[in-house]
Image (cartoon, rainbow, N blue to C red):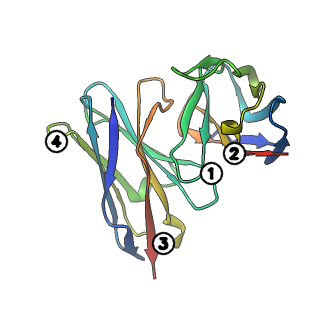
Amino acid sequence: QVQLQESGPGLVKSSETLSLTCTVSGDSLINYYWSWIRQPAGQGLEWIGRVHSNGDTKYNPSLKSRVTISIDTSKNQFSLKLRSVTAADTAVYYCARSSASYYFLYWSQGTLVTVSS
Amino acid sequence: EIVMTQSPATLSVSPGESATLSCRASQSFTYYLAWYQQKPGQAPRLLIYGTSTRATGIPARFSGSGSGTEFTLTISGLQSEDFATYYCQHYINWPLTFGQGTKLEIK
């Protein structure tokens, strides 16, 4: 049973960097693609970006200038850094797994990150 | 970027009836469409991928169809646990995008 669990601060100050880590259990990170997806309250889902187990990354152009996603296969973890956050970055953040077909079977429970001024 | 537009935003249906949810893409493609169900406070759950293939454990009352710019999720014989918000997602190119969702509520 694959399980994903985010960890990181639930409150980030405006202009600072949001940092989250997703720890995967029940399977290896190898040969899969690992994404971050967010959802502002009452709104739809926004794909942030993904990392492959080989370190290759793809980002949403709308966030590309502020995002870094990295992976540590030895720890079975991957991470998100979102720089220069504003209130618009307040959302529930999910981590999720896909294969080379980029639909998402496995999701984390989601973690609310609030950006404060 | 492919914009996915779902309609209606809210759909009111009685239990036992059928519901048809629509997802329109701003660019034409085939196959690479998924549907998710989300309940309040929960992560999305994959229902359909490849336009029409049900994910493991998804009941047969859920069916997907479509191609080009028009895709449909049909739920037959609605049960109480089906009332939720549904999202479509394309995965034909980058960036991956989702529709804004259709909330299926009890009539």
- Measured in 3D between alpha carbons, the distance from the residue under mark 3 to the one under mark 1, in whole angstroms, is 18 Å
Q: Are marks 1 and 2 on the same chain?
A: no
Snapshot quadrant of residue A32? top left
Tell me the residue that label 3 is attached to.
A86
Of the residues under marks 1 and 4, which one precedes in the sequence? 1
Residue A46 spot, x, y in % from top left: 55, 49
B50 on left or right of A18: right
* Residue A64: mark: none
Tell me the residue that label 2 is attached to.
B101
Subunit bearing disc 2: B
A30 on left or right of B81: left
- Measured in 3D between alpha carbons, the distance from the residue under mark 4 to the one under mark 3, in whole angstroms, is 30 Å
Instruction: Name the one closer to the observer, A30 or B46.
Output: B46
Amino acid bearing label 3: Thr
The nearer-to-camera label among 4 and 3 is 4
Do residues under tags 1 and 4 come within 8 Å of each other at their CB atoms? Answer: no
Residue A96 spot, x, y in % from top left: 41, 39
Subunit bearing disc 1: A
Tell me the residue that label 4 is attached to.
A75
- Measured in 3D between alpha carbons, the distance from the residue under mark 1 to the one under mark 4, in whole angstroms, is 31 Å
Subunit bearing disc 4: A
Q: Are marks 4 and 3 on the same chain?
A: yes
Do residues under tags 4 and 3 come within 8 Å of each other at their CB atoms? Answer: no
For the residue labelled by badge 4, is the local secondary structure a helix, a strand or a loop?
Answer: loop
* Residue A44: mark: 1
> In this view, which residue lies farthest toward the left?
A74
Do residues under tags 1 and 2 come within 8 Å of each other at their CB atoms? Answer: yes
- Measured in 3D between alpha carbons, the distance from the residue under mark 3 to the one under mark 2, in whole angstroms, is 25 Å
